[in-house]
Image (tube, rainbow, N blue to C red):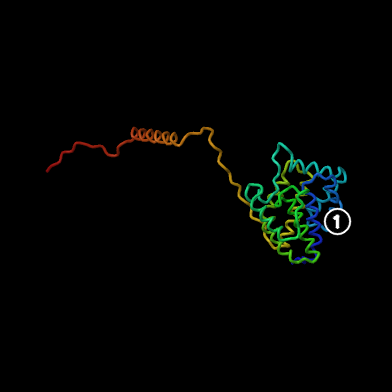
Amino acid sequence: MINKTSVNGARSLYYGLLSKLFVFTTKEDRFEGVDDALAIMMTNPMDTHSHEAMQRLLKSIDEKGTQVLIDEYDAIFHTPGSAPLRSTASFYAEGVESGKKQLEVKNFLAKTKIRRNEASFKENEDSVGFLMTFMHELVELIIQGEKSYETLQHCVFAEIINPFIDEFTQGLFEHNKSDAYKDIAIILNAFMDFERLYFEVSKAPKKEKVVTPKASCEEISPEEAARRAANKAKKAAAQAAEEETPVFVAQDVETDI
């Protein structure tokens, strides 16, 4: 059983770091403090894999600066002319942006004192960046003694984040532009596993990918299809008649009456 009060400080640190790493902004200091947070987190990592990922990420920042994160972030999420990695709960749930999940997050947000700064935050409320920021703020309020937000944070995680975060994380890890962000995906994955233990929720089941049959290169009308089917049936019947061999052959038989 997790002592929830004792781990909230660490949870706030993780959500704060992930907020920085996924919120889109053009500020030059957008990744300021990432290296300090990683150094603290490395002293008590979630697991061996995330510890190694933190080491690699910190080394990359030390050698190349935070520009490596800026370049990768833009290449993965915002490069023109390529398919960006989608980051909203609505997209993974419904295949569209600004869907029902965004409305659900807005409804959760309305129950708090937290408000979105629309001047500086341009992404949807159900984006990964906003959700990490939202959870960070909720945990901070709980640490400050506002226990009423404990149920709300559970709902945000269980109903919004958990159903899609694994699919997003896998997409981030496998993206051909991910290098530093591959390690960030490992850290995110480890923390989400911890959050499931914290909230006592299971992983969302994997969705089966629906394979859509490719359309035929030759498009025909329903009438033409019916005509071709009828002709095919006639040919088959004629061929069967020609090849048919009688089982019994009639003979002239004399019968005494």
- Give residue 157's quadrant in the image: bottom right
Residue 87 position, x and y percent, is 70, 48
- Give residue 60's quadrant in the image: top right
Count of residue discs: 1
Task: Determine crowd level at label 1: few under 14, some 14-19, many 20+ residues with C-alpha closer than 10 A.
Answer: few
Out of 158 and 185, give the one closest to the viewer.
158
Label 1, secondary structure: give it: helix
Residue 5 position, x and y percent, is 79, 66
Q: Amino acid at mark 1?
A: Ile
Q: Residue at 23% of width from left, 37% of height from top?
A: 250
Residue 149 position, x and y percent, is 74, 64
Give above or below for 255 relative to 49: above
Q: Residue at 73% of width from left, 51% of height from top?
A: 128
Out of 225 and 255, give the one closest to the viewer.
225
Query: Does 100 sit left or right of 65 as displayed?
Result: left
Out of 57 and 237, give the one closest to the viewer.
57
